[in-house]
Amino acid sequence: MLAICSEEALVKLVSTSSAVLVLYGGEGCGVCQAVKPQLEKLGRDEFPELVMLYVDCQASAPLCAARGIFSLPVIHLWFEGQRFGEFARVFSIGEVRAALERPYRLAIQQGAAGQ
């Protein structure tokens, strides 16, 4: 999971990648720290072309505030530069997986067809 700390880097990666998962968390957030490795495993095992980003809201408070992130953890899913989904505070890895499956396959197929 790539750590991001600036709006510019976040915008660039979201706009240039077919499929992106952004985890907004904090070092002091126990749930965030528990979810992060589970999401990394999910991406590695089931969604290998998914770009996975991590924003530490304690270190990058202005970025999180600008994005309307005021509780943790929050996950944003992006496909082809458009925000597709959001999970906040209470969610399961299974819910994230289910939300990713179809749009991920379509985005990756579309990307492969364009090459």
Image (cartoon, rainbow, N blue to C red):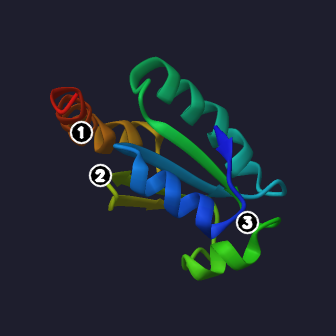
Report the Cα–Cα distance between label 2 and label 1.
7 Å
At 55% from the left and 76% from the top, the residue drawn is 67
Residue 4, horizontal then vertical, whole percent: 68, 54
| Vertical order, 109 against 36 (above or below) | above
Please tell me in which quadrant of the rendered image residue 114 appears.
Answer: top left
Residue sitting nearer the eye, 2 or 86: 2
2 vs 3, front mark: 2
Q: Is residue 13 left or right of residue 31?
A: left
Name the residue carrying label 1.
107
Residue 108, horizontal then vertical, whole percent: 26, 32
Name the residue carrying label 2.
80
Mark 1 Cα shell of 10 Å, populated few (<14), some (14-19), many (≥20): some
Tag 2 and tag 1, C-beta contact below 8 Å: yes
Asked whether residue 2 is in view, the answer is: yes
Name the residue carrying label 3.
57
Residue sitting nearer the eye, 97 or 60: 60
Report the Cα–Cα distance between label 2 and label 3.
24 Å
Residue sitting nearer the eye, 43 or 91: 43
At 76% from the left and 58% from the top, the residue drawn is 26
